[in-house]
Image: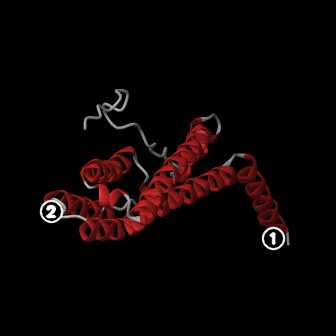
Amino acid sequence: MKRRLFVAVVGLLAAFSFSSCGYNTMVDLEENVKSKWAQVENAYQRRADLIPNLVNTVKGAANFEQETLTQVIEARAKATSVTVDPENLTPEAIQQFQQSQDALSQSLGRLLVSVERYPELKANQNFLELQAQLEGTENRISTERRAFNEATQQYNSAVRRFPNNIMAGIFGFKQKGYFTAEAGAERAPEVQF
């Protein structure tokens, strides 16, 4: 009987100490980071899903440079092939994901600049709608990346604070990576027609 009482008391003390040591908070924050990451991937997937429609509309409405379309298609394939496991949101993994997405953004930018030479395409309602959806998707991506960075900052702060850092080390909670600006993003792009 005394042994059962002792085990029960030790169990209760352990439960209270884990709840007060920040373990549950770190779990909640980590799950929030994973949720925000899923939203980032969702926004990028929406963009990837719009691209075939955009390419087909452009291809059908203009005698378009095949090289530009091929670059967009290849960049989309690369961007959708790079995935990051939510359990492994290291700065390196996020950087690799971001580089593939940046390459897709650049090829889309070249496509949209090239479209300026095709007045009949600029007037095509399907193209205008796809362009508006793509612009909205880019805004969503930016919003989701910001929300992910905010959740990551909150999680990383909790994991690094004392005494949580001790429990984080014991239970394997590691800092997560952030989205960062692309190299050279501080300079305004040069637009030429």
Determine contact: label 2, label 1, CB under 8 Å: no
Left or right, residue 103 beside residue 141: left
Using the image, determine if residue 73 lies above or below residue 89.
below
Residue 85 visible to the viewer:
no
The quadrant of the image that shows the N terminus is bottom right
The quadrant of the image that shows the C terminus is top left
Q: Quadrant of residue 153?
A: top right
Left or right, residue 69 beside residue 55: left
Kind of element beneath mark 1: helix
Q: Amino acid at mark 2?
A: Gln
Residue under label 2: 66
Left or right, residue 146 beside residue 182: right
Q: Amino acid at mark 1?
A: Arg
Q: Quadrant of residue 8?
A: bottom right
First in sequence, mark 2 or 1: give its number.
Answer: 1
Residue under label 1: 4
**Residue 66: image x %, image y %?**
15, 62
**Residue 91: image x %, image y %?**
39, 44
**Residue 79: image x %, image y %?**
30, 59
- Report the residue at 29% width, 66% height from top: 55
- Which residue is nearer to you in this view: 172 or 112? 112
